[in-house]
Image: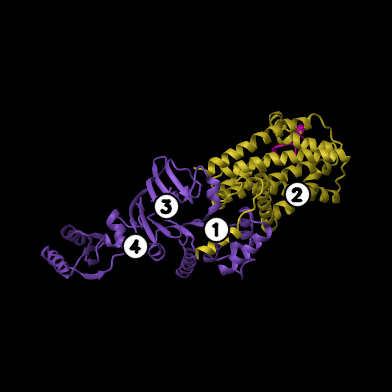
Chain colours: A purple, B yellow
């Protein structure tokens, strides 16, 4: 496979009984860049992470990390990856420092190097003051920071982040974003999964939308947004049936119960759309123009929200 | 900036040692983790130290007076209490294994270039340590309240050997229960099996006082020969075939439970 890509999969498939986790996903992440895997719960994001981290064998297809096959060369893959998963998987009874030293030792660093590395990461992640407190007394944000620090013990060239900011307050989330940006700037290749469009938009070089185990679209945030028009007109109505009738008349997608969103090219098109709605005898309650978001992309391509299961 | 990363990679390169040395190092690292848990989790301390003392005092001074055996009751009951405390201590093992599997830390270990089953080995070693402390507490406190063993050095050694076999084998059974449990609460429930089993043995009262059906069950369950052999080795109680029966039960349990645990662990964590 091409060495330009630090992470590469071809035709990756995995099902659990009747549930199809992944249905043939091709994915490429160039070395030193970040790809965000964006999709709702059950889209197959975690399955992808579990395959790439050697925790799960694919039914079919190939997955390579830094040129190592995740099935055949699993032990080589484990040496070059760091994993941060949804539930902060650290030991609550140990202190932050002890967790870091333990993981360092399990990565087979020498004793003094493991200690030295723990100190470095504690200061890098602003955990020096709580270094010798048991992790069970940490706040959610501190646990996530420690969790990320643990996955960086060996400064892995490839980092897999499975919804790293889920459940964090905005301030902690922002802080974690800054850290992730620094890692990216230092040359780490990152695959991040998220349900948060803003997160994908802010951090990632490229974004892949996935839904029900399939790739829906892939590109930079701008490329994806361009797929749904340059600007969007949002119309809101008094009742849901009104919104439904308006959608029948002018198209677009439903963004909330009583609102629809339509891609528009210019002002003339706005007038034409409003005339059509007026001719249909519908009262427009509110009107707004806005830039397309990744939400619009997702909604347009899949017919449902990133937050919804189905 | 890319240079920073490659520099870091060289600096943080893993030690290149033979695989078995690294595997041993993984085990020692995780044993260190489990030993810290023993010291820091109050419930584990209570189970390990306080509970045996309470049981000892209860059977010595509260119930013991009413139980008639062929020797001083304190001499009779120490072996039973050692085995009963094993059941309590192994609940911790079950819950610990379940918890590790549930909270994702084992997933992290498995994504690392280490020996994943070192987690299980560490749990078993920690169980041995907890039980060694409990047994030592019981024997020492026993001395203080009248326990007078007649064992010579060889008999002590033999008793130690049988208990070591019993605890190791049952710890692996506890690991299996921990892997099988769906939740930490479920693991606690399964722990009741191990807690209850010694009560249904010759641990506290002679089997000859029981109705024939109960006696038949109690005599033929695997914990009774352990209690009987330790008792006969430490005191002047008659030995019978207890030692051989204990070996006949627990050597096979050990030989079966280790590969079974490894297999269930693999199945539970892969796929």
The alpha-carbon separation of the residues under discs 2 and 3 comes to 47 Å
Residue at numbered disc 3: A45
Point out residue A189 in the picture as x, y percentages from the top left corner.
Answer: 47, 58
Residue B37 numbered mark, or none: none
Left or right: A38 in relation to B24: left
Question: Who comes first in sequence, dot 4 or dot 1?
Answer: 1
Q: Please tell me whether residue B201 belongs to the stretch shown in magenta.
A: yes
Query: 10 Å neighbourhood of mark 1: few (<14), some, or many (≥20)?
Result: many
Left or right: A60 in relation to B197: left
Residue at numbered disc 4: A221
Query: 10 Å neighbourhood of mark 3: few (<14), some, or many (≥20)?
Result: many
Residue at numbered disc 2: B134
Residue at numbered disc 1: A151
| Marks 2 and 3 on same chain | no
Q: Secondary structure at mark 2?
A: helix
The alpha-carbon separation of the residues under discs 4 and 3 comes to 18 Å
Tell whether label 1 touches label 4 (CB within 8 Å): no
Point out residue A264 in the picture as x, y percentages from the top left corner.
Answer: 20, 65
Q: Secondary structure at mark 3?
A: helix
Q: Please indicate, yes or no, whether residue A256 appears anywhere in the rendered image.
A: no
Q: Secondary structure at mark 4?
A: helix
- Foreground tag (2 vs 4): 4
Point out residue A285 in the picture as x, y percentages from the top left corner.
Answer: 20, 70
Q: Which residues are magenta?
A: B199-208
Outermost residue, left side: A279
Question: Who comes first in sequence, dot 1 or dot 3?
Answer: 3
């Amino acid at each position: 496979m091409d060495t330009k890509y630090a992470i590469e999969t071809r035709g990756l498939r995995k099902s659990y009984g009747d549930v199809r986790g992944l249905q043939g996903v091709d994915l490429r992440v160039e070395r030193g860049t970040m790809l965000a895997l964006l999709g709702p719960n059950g889209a197959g994001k975690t399955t992808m992470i579990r395959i790439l981290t050697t925790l799960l064998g694919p039914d079919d297809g190939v997955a390579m990390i830094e040129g190592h096959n995740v099935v055949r060369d699993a032990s080589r893959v484990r040496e070059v990856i760091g994993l941060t998963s949804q539930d902060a998987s650290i030991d609550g009874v140990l202190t932050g420092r002890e967790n870091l030293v333990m993981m360092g030792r399990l990565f087979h660093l020498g004793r003094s190097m493991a200690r030295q590395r723990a100190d470095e990461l504690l200061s890098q992640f602003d955990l020096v003051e709580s270094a010798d407190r048991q992790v069970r007394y940490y706040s959610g944000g501190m646990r996530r920071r420690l969790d990320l620090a643990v996955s960086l013990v060996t400064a892995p060239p490839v980092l897999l982040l499975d919804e790293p900011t889920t459940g964090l307050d905005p301030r902690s989330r922002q802080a974690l974003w800054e850290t992730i940006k620094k890692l990216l700037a230092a040359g780490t290749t990152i695959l991040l999964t998220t349900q948060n469009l803003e997160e994908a938009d802010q951090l990632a070089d490229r974004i892949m939308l996935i839904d029900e185990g399939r790739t829906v679209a892939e590109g930079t945030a701008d490329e994806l947004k361009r797929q749904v028009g340059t600007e969007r007109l949002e119309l809101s109505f008094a009742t849901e049936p009104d919104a439904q009738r308006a959608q029948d008349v002018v198209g677009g997608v439903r963004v909330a119960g009583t609102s629809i969103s339509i891609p528009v090219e210019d002002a003339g098109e706005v007038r034409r759309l409003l005339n059509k709605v007026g001719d249909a005898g519908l009262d427009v309650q509110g009107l707004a123009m806005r830039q397309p978001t990744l939400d619009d992309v997702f909604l347009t391509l899949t017919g449902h929200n990133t937050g919804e299961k189905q | 900036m890319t240079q920073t990363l490659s520099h870091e990679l060289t600096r943080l390169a893993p030690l290149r040692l033979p695989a078995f040395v690294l595997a041993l190092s993984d085990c020692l690292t995780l044993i260190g983790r489990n030993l810290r848990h023993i010291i820091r989790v109050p419930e584990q301390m209570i189970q390990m130290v306080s509970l045996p003392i309470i049981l000892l005092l209860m059977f010595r001074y509260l119930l013991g007076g009413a139980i008639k055996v062929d020797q001083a009751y304190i001499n009779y009951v120490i072996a039973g209490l050692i085995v009963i405390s094993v059941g309590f201590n192994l609940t911790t093992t079950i819950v610990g294994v379940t918890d590790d599997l549930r909270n994702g830390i084992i997933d992290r270990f498995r994504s690392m270039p280490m020996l994943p089953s070192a987690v299980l080995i560490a749990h078993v070693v920690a169980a041995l340590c907890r039980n060694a402390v409990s047994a030592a507490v019981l024997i020492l406190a026993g001395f203080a309240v009248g326990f007078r063993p007649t064992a010579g050095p060889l008999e002590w050694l033999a008793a130690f050997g049988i208990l070591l076999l019993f605890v190791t084998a049952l710890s692996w059974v506890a690991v299996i229960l921990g892997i099988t449990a769906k939740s930490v609460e479920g693991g606690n429930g399964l722990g009741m099996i191990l807690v209850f089993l010694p009560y249904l043995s010759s641990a506290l009262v002679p089997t000859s006082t029981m109705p024939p059906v109960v006696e038949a069950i109690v005599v033929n369950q695997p914990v009774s020969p352990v209690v009987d052999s330790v008792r006969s080795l430490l005191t002047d109680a008659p030995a019978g075939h207890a030692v051989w029966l204990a070996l006949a039960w627990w050597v096979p349990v050990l030989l079966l439970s280790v590969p079974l645990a490894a297999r269930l662990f693999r199945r539970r964590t892969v796929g």
